Image: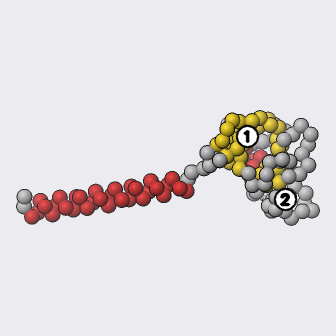
Amino acid sequence: MTSTTGLRAAMLAGVALVALAVALALSQHGGKHNSLPAPAGQYYTALAAPYTPSAKTAKSACGVAIGPKTEGVAHPVLPCGVKIYVKFGGKQVLTQVIDRGHIVPGREFDVTQALAKLLGLQGTQTIQWRFAR
């Protein structure tokens, strides 16, 4: 083997090693930041409708400031901060309980205006929901 051939082989091995290191770094980086919590259990059905919280309070019962872009749900029993998947009209969104409130009889969830817009939810509708891990 000549010195030119040996040098060429060493350079190719170096390039392959760098490419392998970059590929490993990208695969590990993407897994940490793009993963959502796994759904847990079955879907449940419930009635839900958009709501606008009272203008008198600056924060929800869970301590969250609710503005026009706040996405979340109000539920009378689920703990504040619990993460759930909500599915409606072919869309599934990961959200959380951010408020309590006076739920209309027969309705289980109130959803913020921003979440209702994201889901395409208008009026009282049947949604599906399940817990996130």
Q: Circle 2: is it few (<14), some (14-19), or many (20+) Cα within 10 Å? A: some
In this orientation, which residue lies closer to the viewer: 34 or 91? Answer: 34
Could you say where residue 129 lies in the image, as x and y percent from the top left? 73, 40
The quadrant holding residue 91 is top right
CA distance separating discs 1 and 2: 22 Å
Q: Which SS class for mark 2?
A: loop
Can residue 93 be seen in this snapshot?
Answer: no
Q: Residue furthest left?
A: 2
Q: Circle 1: is it few (<14), some (14-19), or many (20+) Cα within 10 Å? A: many
Amino acid at pointer 1? Trp
Could you say where residue 21 lies in the image, as x and y percent from the top left? 36, 59
Q: Along the horizontal axis of the image, is 58 left or right of 128?
A: right
Residue 28's mark?
Answer: none
The N terminus is located in which quarter? bottom left
Q: Which SS class for mark 1?
A: strand
Residue ID at (25%, 61%): 14
In this orientation, which residue lies closer to the viewer: 70 or 37? Answer: 37
Q: Along the horizontal axis of the image, is 7 left or right of 33?
A: left
Residue ID at (50%, 54%): 30
Could you say where residue 133 lies in the image, as x and y percent from the top left? 65, 47
Amino acid at pointer 2? Ser
Could you say where residue 25 lies in the image, as x and y percent from the top left? 42, 59
The quadrant holding residue 13 is bottom left
Residue ID at (55%, 53%): 34
Residue 129's mark?
Answer: 1
Can residue 28 be seen in this snapshot?
Answer: yes
Residue that mark 2 sits on: 60
